[in-house]
Amino acid sequence: MSDLGDFSEFEADSEPASDSATEAEAAETTEESDPGAATGADRSGGGSGTSESADSGSGSAADEFDRQRFETAGADAGIGTLAVSEGLRIAEDEADTRLRAYVTAGNRSDVRLGTYLLAPYPGEESLFCRINGLEYAQEFRSDDATEIHARRAMRSTDIDERDYKFMADLEPLAVLYPEGGELRRRMPDRVPKPETVVRHADDREKITTGLQIPEEGVFLGHLAVGGEKVRTKAEPPTVDYRLDDGTEGTDPLIFRHVLVAGGTGSGKTHTAKNVLRQYLHEDRRYAVEPGGDRTPRPAVVQFDPQDEYAQMHDDNPAVGPDERREWEAQDVAFGGHADTVAFVPTVGNARYAADHHKAEQKPFTIPFSMVRGNKWLVAGAQLNDNQYGALEYLIDRFFDQAGESPTYDGFRHFLDDPALREELDESGRVHEATFDAVKRRVFSIPQGVFDQDARPITELVREFVRPGRLSVVPTYHINTSRAAEMVVLAVASLLIDQKLSNDPLYDRIKETPLVVGMDEAHNFLADADSVQARKVIGKFTEAAKQGRKERLGLFLITQDPQDIAEPVFKQVNTRIALNLGDEDAVASLNLPTSLDARVPDMQRGQMAVYSPDNSKPVEVIGLPTCVTRHGRDG
């Protein structure tokens, strides 16, 4: 007897049995060499082999794995549960936080990056969080990177979700809790229990509290995730996104400045019009001094290089009755703003055509007298420090001699005097080479900017800055960009200087809350290595720093935010990013990672909003229809 015991005496069966075994081996070999042949026939339900096997009561149908079917008692609540298999941890350092949820098969198609969820604690508190990662993982240990697996999948129409885990990484945003009849929030400081059921956040109050979105304020759009509006159980189901407007004793965010950035076709002008229209609402008022009793309506001055904003005077004919009812219910200001005036700069022979809007037009000119306080206006090209010092001396001397009616032409004649050049050179006050350099710069500025046949803007201040008025300064008709730049900077400087002055010449500017809008802001506020550029940027930087105190808000619109001087940019509290394809432009906005990557793929009207003093960073969808007239055809 061998080590195999009784099996050592085993003898093969008769010859027919051996033939049967050989046939089985051959069939197995055939299936291994072309696994798709049998698999395809089985899945299609066709083929004679399948039919014969079924008729004989044996074969593949009998050998297939039968998945057990079962019915659960009751209904599932939520989308899944918190998993502890890889740790469940809340930490002060976000990198150390570990919060993952298993999403059940039936809920996976409804989950997106950015989806807001709630995970309750024992008691009345709950953790408000958002999904910042999604992953499929294997339910069973196997290798699916094989020829057989791939070819079977290629012949299948679907997968069985129960064969895989679907895991969601969660970013904890806030702990929500009731106190004194109100819902409040605090930073995440508790770890939820394992197997806690997570649910979609579909309660409007919990969403706005969790994201710190003000209940009241300037309407911007509706909260969104992945290009779709967030829906709640409330009516209407959408969640308004509003900018804090000082309704609860805080400083209105507009006086901490707003930037709208977007590429061509992203809808930035459409968005800007919709936002500016809210600041012209008849009920919107601001205290001249924080905490003061006098609360006039703000004045809005919009510099308009493409001649689009005067259309805000007119209704949008595309607005239907359903939209009107919806906007009225949401307290959204809409319709043309009757008190809209186009203040048209008169520059040389340029003519302004305005058949695309019905706003009143008032021509004006820049008086050369404004140069005394803003000498960089006539600097022309770049000047070094020595040359700029000489320019300042020459302008002051001219104004001292010119009396009450200084003009640009008079200044040119003043510089043309050879006796003056010789006197300054001999006295050592201004070297002749420096004098010549200054003269060339002054003579090189565009003609027709100063002292044209129109009323000076300084005589129109009470009309230009009026509570509740939208004053638009179009520059599209001006022939050169340099002339347009001079007009914009001259008028903007007038507003800023009077706002910041302790002894203003124009009390109307000082005492009126003021929003200064500037489209294509990168053309006017770009940083440069020249004295005059430093003067301009210094002026706007100081204005931005004093905005809250002086009730001055900058509303900047640009497609090249990276070109705006950093000292000004750093003062902007609210950044609204529409579609931007330029990597440098996106990076300059310093958006959180969760929003940064989405900006290049945003559709028209989608926007990322980063306003730390207003809310958590969020995605918003603006109104699809402009609340005023927009576009030359509508």
Image (cartoon, rainbow, N blue to C red):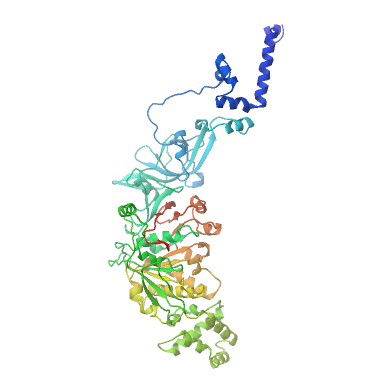
Instruction: Identify which residue, 277 or 250, lies in the foreground.
Output: 277
Query: Residue 129, located in which quarter of the rendered image?
Result: top left
Instruction: Identify which residue, 136 or 150, lies in the foreground.
Output: 150
Report the side of 284 relative to 437 (left or right).
left
Report the side of 381 relative to 217 (left or right).
right
Q: Residue at x 58, y 32 (%)?
A: 153
Where is residue 90? Give x, y as percent: 46, 42
Would you place residue 200 above or below residue 390 in this image?
above
Where is residue 112? Give x, y as percent: 47, 43
Residue 312 makes an appearance in the image: yes
Residue furthest to the left: 293
Instruction: Identify which residue, 565 or 410, lies in the foreground.
Output: 410
Q: Residue at x 44, y 79 (%)?
A: 373
Which quadrant: the N terminus? top right
Where is residue 169? Give x, y as percent: 49, 41
Would you place residue 106 above or below residue 269 in this image?
above
Would you place residue 336 above or below residue 395 in this image?
above
Query: Residue 55, located in which quarter of the rendered image?
Result: top right
Report the side of 355 relative to 13 (left or right).
left
Residue furthest to the bottom: 419
